[in-house]
Amino acid sequence: MHPDAHDDSIALDLPGIARVPVEVRLFSPLDLAASKLARFADHDQEDIRALARAGLIDADALRLRAEEALADYAGDERRVRTSIRFARDLVRKSYARARRRSTSRAKKLAP
């Protein structure tokens, strides 16, 4: 996990739940995607695709954030680096595909 993940997370205000002693926080989209790179199972890849299609993450920002987080990683970095490269391409393709669909829909709706 990136050292700034907590600072960049979003505190959630949940009705009926006091922030003390428990504060519920939500990862930023970028840290959520980066957190999926170590395992990088099919469902992790689909989550990353969904974030990219929604325009919530950028391929280069994900690569940078994940590489910065490797400084604190306690496993086999080679595997994660491979996942980072694959995820960068996955995000680019998913984002581009979503943009094409959006443009196509806009053209169909245009008078």
Image: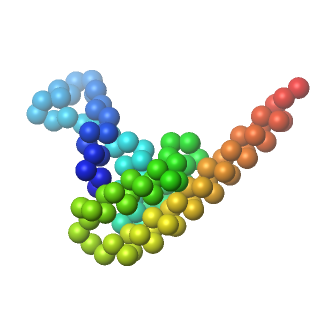
Q: How many marks?
A: 0
Query: Does 49 appear above or below 26?
Result: below
User: Which corner quadrant of the image does residue 24 belong to?
Assistant: top left
| Residue nearer the viewer, 61 or 19 | 61
Q: Is residue 59 left or right of residue 64?
A: right
Q: Position of residue 109 (x, y in %)?
A: 82, 31
Q: Position of residue 97 (x, y in %)?
A: 68, 52
| Residue nearer the viewer, 93 or 25 | 93
Which residue does the image show at 52% across and 48% down from the upper left? 58
Which residue does the image show at 52% across and 53% down from the upper left? 59
Query: Does 27 appear above or below 85?
Result: above
Query: Does 56 appear above or below 13?
Result: below
Asked if one can make out residue 50 in the rendered structure from this viewpoint, the answer is no
User: Which corner quadrant of the image does residue 64 belong to?
Assistant: bottom left
Q: Position of residue 47 (x, y in %)?
A: 48, 54
Residue at the farthest right position: 111
Which residue does the image show at 50% across and 53% down from the upper left? 60
Residue at the farthest left position: 21
Residue at the farthest top position: 15
| Residue nearer the viewer, 1 or 67 | 67
Where, quadrant-wise, is the N terminus in this rendering? Answer: bottom left
Q: Position of residue 16 (x, y in %)?
A: 22, 24
Asked if one can make out residue 1 in the rendered structure from this viewpoint, the answer is yes
Where, quadrant-wise, is the C terminus in this rendering? Answer: top right
User: Which corner quadrant of the image does residue 13 belong to?
Assistant: top left
Which residue does the image show at 24% across and 61% down from the upper left? 72
